[in-house]
Image (cartoon, rainbow, N blue to C red):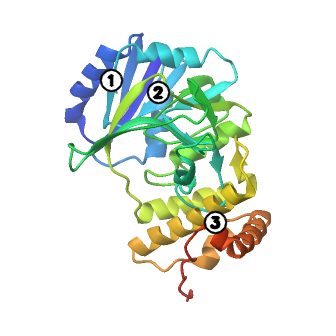
Amino acid sequence: MISIIICTAQLKKIDEIQRNISETIGVKHELIIIDNSQSQYNIFQAYNIGVKRSNFEILCFMHDDIIYHGINWGEAVLSHFHEKNTGMIGIGGTRFLNSIPTIWWAGGERFSNTHDSTICINCIQTNRENPNISNYTFINPEKAVRTKVVVLDGLWFCIRKSLFEKIRFDEINYTGFHFYDLDICMQINQLKLSIYCIYDIQIEHISSSKHDLFWIQNCEIFYRKWKSHLPISHTELTLDQIIKIEYDSFRNTYQIYRMQNLRFPRMKFIRNIHITNFLTFHFKHLIFRIKRNRLNMSQSPTFEKED
């Protein structure tokens, strides 16, 4: 009933992963392992291979550093696809993705404890370097079994196999291991199908975020590819909220570039934004400056002049 696709370079972990899945899934399944021990594939290539090898209608794509807690999570997965318009489910995503190139959760932290939260997540996050550091992050703005989002994080998600007649992990434009998740979500959005963050299974992710040069490269590709379709939203936000999110997104990407000892490429960055969205952003940013004291926000970062 469910084909589970994993790309891994650590084949010694497979027995442990398979045991955890078998003890918790509760439905018929197959495990498809893409051996990447020689680094011969990027994630886009590996997942496309997995789709071709799969035999069941529901495809589950997961990282190799996931642990399932509880039992019968497979039944929960299948139940979400009873609705024909459901195209994809996952355990972390956002209801609003703006046109400012950044990480998908940037800015959403501001509203994480309110009904207005753009972030939706249901995951135990354990630090790989220090397993004693573990936090259960549960943000459910609608207090429902699932919440409609625009994109999902790639650590774990499921898609109908039949959709791959129309969609595909984009191995032509991208390389590496970043933005495969957001890109496939945008393809599903174009099909007018629903994407949900679900709250009835519990997964532990043992990892740490990595925003390196490869992340920056794919970030630029993603926002250039989809700039005419952004921003995209499944929630109503006030002007002040949008200003805050977009401002934080701009500042967040600036910090990522600086951490990589790169100048923030302002002109190249701007080219990734659709002109209408760019003008809208600057209009809102002007309003932000006027309202700075009322919004209680810090001053804008100073950007270095590009060569």
> Where's residue 38, x and y in %?
28, 47
Q: Earlier in the sequence, mark 3 or mark 1?
A: 1
Q: Residue at x 24, y 35 (%)?
A: 11
Secondary-structure class at tag 3: helix
- Vertical relation: 81 (above or below) 204: above
Q: Residue at x 50, y 19 (%)?
A: 77
Q: Which residue is mark 3?
A: 295
State if disc 2 and disc 1 touch (CB < 8 Å): no
Q: Give the label, 3 or 1, closer to the camera.
A: 3
Using the rendered view, name the quadrant where residue 15 is placed.
top left
Q: Which residue is mark 2?
A: 60
> Where's residue 143, x and y in %?
57, 29
Q: Residue at x 22, y 26 (%)?
A: 16
Locate the C terminus by quadrant: bottom right
Q: Residues within 10 Å of mark 2 (few under 14, many from 20)?
A: many
Q: Which residue is mark 1?
A: 69
* Near-viewer residue (299 or 201): 299
Q: Which residue type does callout 3 highlight?
A: Leu
Secondary-structure class at tag 2: strand
* Near-viewer residue (144 or 66): 144
Asked whether residue 34 is in view, the answer is no
- Label total for image: 3
Q: Earlier in the sequence, mark 3 or mark 2?
A: 2
Left of 173 or right of it: where is 274?
right
- Vertical relation: 265 (above or below) 127: below
Left of 289 or right of it: where is 222?
left
Q: Earlier in the sequence, mark 1 or mark 2?
A: 2
Q: Which residue type does callout 2 highlight?
A: Cys
* Near-viewer residue (280 or 288): 288
